[in-house]
Every structure is written in C-alpha cells, then in structure tokens.
Amino acid sequence: MKEMLINWIAGFFLITSVCGTLDPIGTKCGDKRCSTTEYCSPFDSHCRPCSVACDSTSHNFQPEICVKDCQ
C-alpha cells in the first residue's frame, strides 16, 4: 500500500511538471503564436513544423529542439 502511494505521488509530480512546460494554446513566437504542432525557431523567430525537426531521417533533424519544444 505504501509503495502504491509513493508511485501515485511520483506520477502526479511527473505529470504536473510535464503539463506545466507545454502550452496548450501554442508557443509565443515574436508577435504571433505557433500552433501546438509547431515550435518557435531560435534562428529567425518563425514558427516551424515539429514534424520536420523530429524526423530522424531528415537532414533538418534537430533532436534537441524536438525534445525541448515539440513534446
């Protein structure tokens, strides 16, 4: 029972921290907001599709941005 309570508390904090970092209405990018399937490019402050940044077969694959801004 004690182990179950500890797992529940750990899961709650994990979910809270993950949900706290993702904005359900999209990321602010300059004067606009990116959709939830886009990220704000640090190079030119334009919204770019996560599908490109997260595609490991693409020459534009950016794993750091994918993990940080697209999850």
Image (tube, rainbow, N blue to C red):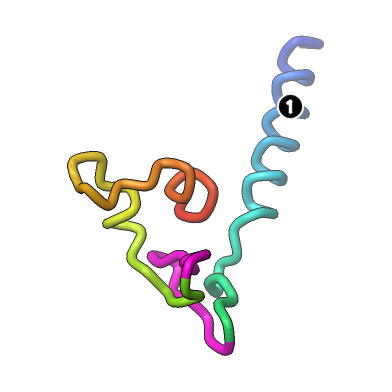
Residue at 63% from the left image edge and 52% from the top image edge: 19
- In the rendered image, the quadrant that contains the N terminus is top right
- Which SS class for mark 1? helix
Residue at 37% from the left image edge and 69% from the top image edge: 48
Residue 10 spot, x, y in % from top left: 73, 27
- Which of 68/4 is in front? 68
Against 39, residue 7 (above or below) is: above
Q: How many numbered discs sit on the rendered protein?
A: 1
Residue at 78% from the left image edge and 19% from the top image edge: 6
Against 15, residue 1 (above or below) is: above
What predominant SS class does the magenta segment belong to?
loop
Say left or right for 15 vs 37: right
Q: Quadrant of residue 56?
A: top left
Residue 67 located within the stretch drawn in magenta: no
- Which of 5/50 is in front? 50
Say left or right for 9 vs 67: right
Say left or right for 38 vs 69: left
Amino acid type, mark 1? Ala
Residue 52 spot, x, y in % from top left: 27, 56
Residue at 47% from the left image edge and 74% from the top image edge: 44
Residue 41 located within the stretch drawn in magenta: yes
Instruction: Provide the residue designation for mark 1.
Output: 10
How would you rate the neighbour count of disc 1 (Cα within 10 Å): few for under 14, some for 14-19, many for 20 or more? few
List the single residue furthest toward the left.
57
Against 68, residue 14 (above or below) is: above
The span picked out in magenta is 31-43
